[in-house]
Image: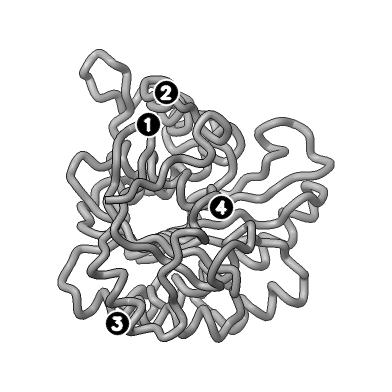
Amino acid sequence: MRVRRPAVAGIFYPAERDALIDAIDECFRHPLGPLGGGGSGSSGSGSGRVRPDGAGGEGKAIMPIAMVSPHAAYMYSGAVAAHSYHAASSLKPDLIIMLGPNHYGLGSAVATMVDCQWETPLGGVPVNSDEARRLVRLSGILDIDDYAHSRDHCLEVQIPMLQYIYRHRFSILPIVLWMQDRDTASDLGSAIAELIESSGMSTLLIASSDLTHYEPNEEAYRKDGELIKAILELDVSRYYTVLERLDVSACGYGAIGAVMVAAKRLGASSASLLKYATSGDVTGDKGSVVGYASIVFS
């Protein structure tokens, strides 16, 4: 079996196992994270490792069908990302379908991969090749192309978080999109929903995306706030309208669109914003920021 080796270990997150676990712990305990800076949630094992419990931002249990999570370096977006992983930690999915943008434009426009596992400092996670091939047949627009996944960080940074919150064995179905228009999102999202409906597997969907890029903090909050309203209303048409009208530079907008389509078909009736923050909220430099959101669909 081929191994997809880490492309951004040591850059976006630590390359050494213990340091990586400590970094993820810090994401949960960070003042912007779901445990608000520490104390609660310890595993009691003596390691100090956080035990996520699946509670939402107000302590209310959430059982997500799908979620949106950012993908910057952990020091910038990890605390925001930890909110959606905290909410999903009470699940036990067999399959995690992950969608994100193809930042480098490598390979096929909409691509998955098969017959491999993704390696991180926390171990290997297998790709579910049978389900990936079946989704290729169902979608008509999805190709099998390892090269498209070779350098991108958008899905890679999600995997250590998944390994951290889940102790059971799970598989992934990774998808990166260079083509992110509304028709692509609709076709792919519908095919994903059909796959899940017929598979009988417990499944979690993840859309990996950052939001506004390199604008003043106030503008990021304004633009992203309006875009998030459309996401929370599960209104795909309005979502794409806001993207275009405000020229929101969300890099994984097609991933979010496809997951919205799939989540609605799978019965999601609500969406919750667990956390929004910008890189400026982390670093204090608010002149040119990137926006991050954790959103769950249930």
- Are the residues at dot 1 and dot 2 in contact (C-beta closer than 8 Å)? yes
What kind of element bears circle 2?
Answer: loop
- On the question of residue 177 being in view, the answer is yes
Answer with mark 3 or mark 4, whichever residue precedes in sequence: 3
What kind of element bears circle 1?
Answer: loop
How far apart are labels 2 and 3 at the CA level? 39 Å
Q: Which mark is residue 16?
A: 2
Count of numbered marks:
4
What kind of element bears circle 3?
Answer: helix
Which residue is disc 4 drawn over?
Answer: 293
Which residue is disc 1 drawn over?
Answer: 121
Task: Answer with the quarter of the image where residue 182 lies.
Answer: bottom right
Kind of residue sitting beneath label 4 = Ala
Answer with mark 3 or mark 1, whichever residue precedes in sequence: 1
Task: Answer with the quarter of the image where residue 139 lies.
Answer: bottom left
Residue 50: x and y in percent read: 33, 28
Count residues near mark 2 (Cα–Cα under 10 Å), then give few for <14, some for 14-19, many for 20+: few
Which residue is disc 3 drawn over?
Answer: 194
- Are the residues at dot 2 and dot 3 in contact (C-beta closer than 8 Å)? no
- Are the residues at dot 3 and dot 4 in contact (C-beta closer than 8 Å)? no
